Each structure stands twice: as structure tokens, then as C-alpha cells.
């Protein structure tokens, strides 16, 4: 029997109180955009997508039913969905529910089963337990299956909600979190390494919209870093559909820092200029924060003292989703979201250019400001912003 509906359940959205409708509608819109993305222009995969009590339902067309695998992959990347299921629907009379349960279970080979009913429509004449018992007895009689409440071979789920009755055999885990686009815009510093894509994933999971910013040192470094960054941005698009990527030339700033500032301060000053440029772009984009892939203590620039010195130069908040992660945890997540293989491709990062042998690890802000005194900060920032490129 082919599925005709998709039932999308959420967790966190259900706690939003008076704002719940806003989050539900955003989730519905994101589901619609993701499903349209995998359908051709001439094929409509669904009749409608709408909110009902505590869930989003999608009624599939015949063409949509044929793309169950593609739809499943797409929905697993939609933030806000706790789990979803491909379901069939029937009327709300017990003989119809029993008949439909028998039909879908007849397609499975099993010795033990369980009926799990969720009755959101409280005026329905039977309780969830009574429905479980009656449908279970019908299956035992017709299929000789044995009811087992703990770890059965197959679980038949029944949802009675509004005017619908849905039945399905599998819950597919979603990405969780909040729907993309519900928490404002952020500027993400995307380096081409392992950490920043994972950091992006976690900030997207909290409902933010990411605008990517990449610094390069062409022609002193290979174009490979640009290619990798574009590929990473594309890979991350599956979590927010579309994104904008700013590509900022950084070599002139690095030259100035190399010739006019103490060697041990170079990386800190690089990062301070990056923050200033990111803040400038955030004002243009209406972004509310800068996001980095920093993890406390992972490299020299990521000590508590250095991070404090780096963020001192801007007023915009700097978010670090990976601050408490170790490298192994980050790699595991990178593999899971399919960015790891891209990130480990060889490339030259701009921050690795002109790096001193002994970088400062416990910077004092007074010394950092003193190290910048011979740099025309305003001019360097304006020139970098003026010469940037945008990839969409």
C-alpha cells in the first residue's frame, strides 16, 4: 500500500506559546520549499501542506509518492522536524481503522507487533488504550500475530487528529531544532576547514539564517580555498536552501600587519580585522551576530585571553557554537553532515600565511591596541569591503 500523507511532528516549537503559530508557519513554508526543490518544474509532488493540531501534514500526489526516498532525505535536513512518517489515511470509524491497520500490516512479515494510538481528538468515543486493544485483537485474529509491548517486530502507529486518522509503521528521525529563518541573520566566517561548517550547522539548527564570509590571500595562495569554500556553502545549503557567500581579499591587510606590527601579534590582528569587516557586512545585511568555528584552547588564537582581545574591536555579538567541543566531536559531526571530505581537501588558508613561529597566546588588550597603532584601520577595512566579491 502506497503512502499518501507525510506527518511531520515537532518538539521545541510546541513550547513556544503565543509565538507557536509563527514557528509552525515557517516550518510549513520550509517543508514546501524543500519538497519543491526535488520536484521538476512540471511535476507537483503534493496537493497541500497545512498545519493541524500539533503537526504539519503533507498530502502527496501520485508523482510525490514515487519520490519517497528523495523526500525522506530532504525532510531529514529540515530543522524544526523532530520526526516524520509516510502514512495512509482512513475514516474515523473503528471498522475502517481496523481494516486499514490490517492492510498495512499484511505487507510485513512479523511474529510480534504493537498498536500505538495517539488520540488528539478527545471527543472520539474510545480512549487510546481501547483503540489499541480493539485493533490489536483484530490483527491477532486475522494474522495470528502476537502482541508484544516491549521491542515488537513491528509497531503500528495510529493518530486520530481533527478529521483525520493516520496509520504508519515507521518514524523517521528529523534534524530537530528550530525552523530556518526564525532567529535572524548571522555572518558566518567560513574558512574551508573542518570546524566552521560544523559551527554553521549548529547555528542553523537554532533557526538562524547564515550569510557566509570567506577571506582569501590570492594570488599568494591557491584558488583551491575559494573552490572549497563554495563547495562547502553548497553542501550547507541543504539545511537552509540558499545562501550568499562574500569573498574578501585579505592579502593587503596581511602585508601591512607583517611590516608594521610585532610578529607574535599577527594572527590576533588578522582576526581583529576579520571581525571589523564582518561587522561592516553585518550592517549591510541586517545580521545580528558573527559566528565562528572557534573551540576553546584548540589553537593559539583560541585561548580565552586571545578571543577576548579579538572581539574587543567590534560591538556586534560573536557566537561560538563549538566553544566546548573537542576535535574528535567536531570531526564526527562533520562526517555526519557530509562536509568532512570537502574540508580535508588540501588548501592554503589565509591565516596560515606569514604566521610567526611563536604566536601570542595570552594577549593583553593594551598591547594589542599598541600593536595596531601604525595601521590605518579604517582605510584597510574600507578597501577590503570595496574589493569583495559575492557568490550566490
Image (cartoon, rainbow, N blue to C red):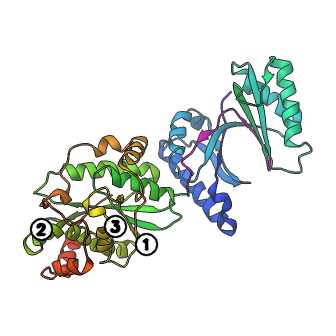
Label 2 Cα neighbours within 10 Å, binned few <14 / some 14-19 / many ≥20: some
Q: Residue at x 18, y 75 (%)?
A: 383
Please name the residue that numbered disc 3 is placed on: 304
- Does 15 appear above or below 256? above
Classify residue 311 by image quadrant.
Answer: bottom left
Q: Is residue 330 left or right of residue 127?
A: left
Q: Nearer the viewer, mark 2 or mark 3?
A: 3
Q: CA distance from mark 2 to mark 3?
A: 20 Å
Task: Identify the residue position indicated by label 1 in the image.
Answer: 288
- Residue 339 shows up from this direction: yes
Checking the image for residue 365, the label placed there is none
Mark nearer the N terminus (1 vs 3): 1
> Mark 2 — residue?
263
Quadrant for the N terminus, please.
top right
Q: Quadrant of residue 359?
A: bottom left
Sooner in the amino-acid sequence: mark 2 or mark 1: 2
Magenta stretch: give its range: 161-177
- Looking at the rendered structure, the secondary structure element under dot 3 is helix
Characterize the local packing of mark 3: few (<14), some (14-19) or many (20 or more) Cα atoms within 10 angstroms. Answer: some
Amino acid at each position: 500500500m502506497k503512502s499518501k500523507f507525510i506527518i511531520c511532528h515537532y518538539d521545541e516549537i510546541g513550547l513556544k506559546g503565543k509565538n507557536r503559530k509563527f514557528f509552525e508557519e515557517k516550518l510549513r513554508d520550509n517543508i514546501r520549499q524543500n519538497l519543491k526543490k526535488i520536484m521538476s518544474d512540471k511535476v507537483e509532488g503534493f496537493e497541500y501542506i497545512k498545519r493541524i493540531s500539533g503537526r504539519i501534514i503533507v498530502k502527496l500526489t501520485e508523482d510525490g509518492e514515487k519520490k519517497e526516498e528523495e523526500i525522506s532525505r530532504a525532510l531529514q535536513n529540515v530543522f524544526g522536524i523532530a520526526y516524520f512518517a509516510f502514512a495512509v489515511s482512513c475514516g474515523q470509524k473503528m471498522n475502517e481503522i481496523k481494516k486499514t491497520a490490517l492492510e498495512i500490516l499484511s505487507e510485513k512479515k512479523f511474529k510480534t507487533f504493537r498498536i500505538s494510538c495517539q488520540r488528539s481528538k478527545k471527543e472520539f468515543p474510545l480512549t487510546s488504550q481501547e483503540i489499541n486493544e480493539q485493533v490489536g485483537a483484530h490483527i491477532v485474529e486475522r494474522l495470528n500475530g502476537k502482541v508484544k509491548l516491549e521491542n515488537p517486530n513491528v509497531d503500528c502507529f495510529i493518530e486520530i487528529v481533527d478529521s483525520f486518522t493516520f496509520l504508519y509503521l515507521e518514524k523517521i528521525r528529523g534534524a530537530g531544532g528550530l525552523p530556518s529563518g526564525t532567529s535572524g541573520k548571522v555572518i558566518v566566517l567560513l574558512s574551508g576547514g573542518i570546524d566552521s561548517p560544523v559551527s554553521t550547522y549548529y547555528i542553523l539548527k537554532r533557526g538562524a539564517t547564515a550569510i557566509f564570509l570567506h577571506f582569501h590571500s590570492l594570488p599568494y595562495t591557491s584558488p583551491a580555498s575559494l573552490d572549497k569554500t563554495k563547495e562547502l556553502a553548497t553542501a550547507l545549503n541543504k539545511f537552509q536552501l540558499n545562501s550568499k557567500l562574500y569573498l574578501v581579499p585579505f592579502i593587503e591587510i596581511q602585508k601591512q600587519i607583517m611590516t608594521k606590527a610585532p610578529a607574535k601579534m599577527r594572527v590576533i590582528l588578522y582576526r581583529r580585522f576579520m571581525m571589523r569587516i564582518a561587522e561592516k557586512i553585518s550592517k549591510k545585511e541586517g545580521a545580528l551576530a558573527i559566528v565562528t568555528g572557534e573551540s576553546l584552547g584548540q589553537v593559539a588564537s583560541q585561548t580565552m585571553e586571545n578571543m577576548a582581545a579579538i572581539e574587543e574591536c567590534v560591538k556586534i555579538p560573536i557566537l561560538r557554537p563549538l566553544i566546548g567541543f573537542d576535535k574528535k566531536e567536531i570531526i564526527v559531526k562533520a562526517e555526519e553532515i557530509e562536509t568532512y571530505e570537502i574540508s580535508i581537501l588540501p588548501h592554503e588558508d589565509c591565516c596560515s600565511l606569514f604566521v610567526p613561529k611563536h604566536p601570542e597566546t595570552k594577549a593583553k588588550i593594551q598591547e594589542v591596541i599598541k600593536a595596531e597603532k601604525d595601521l590605518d584601520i579604517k582605510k584597510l577595512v574600507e578597501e577590503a569591503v570595496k574589493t569583495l566579491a559575492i557568490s550566490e
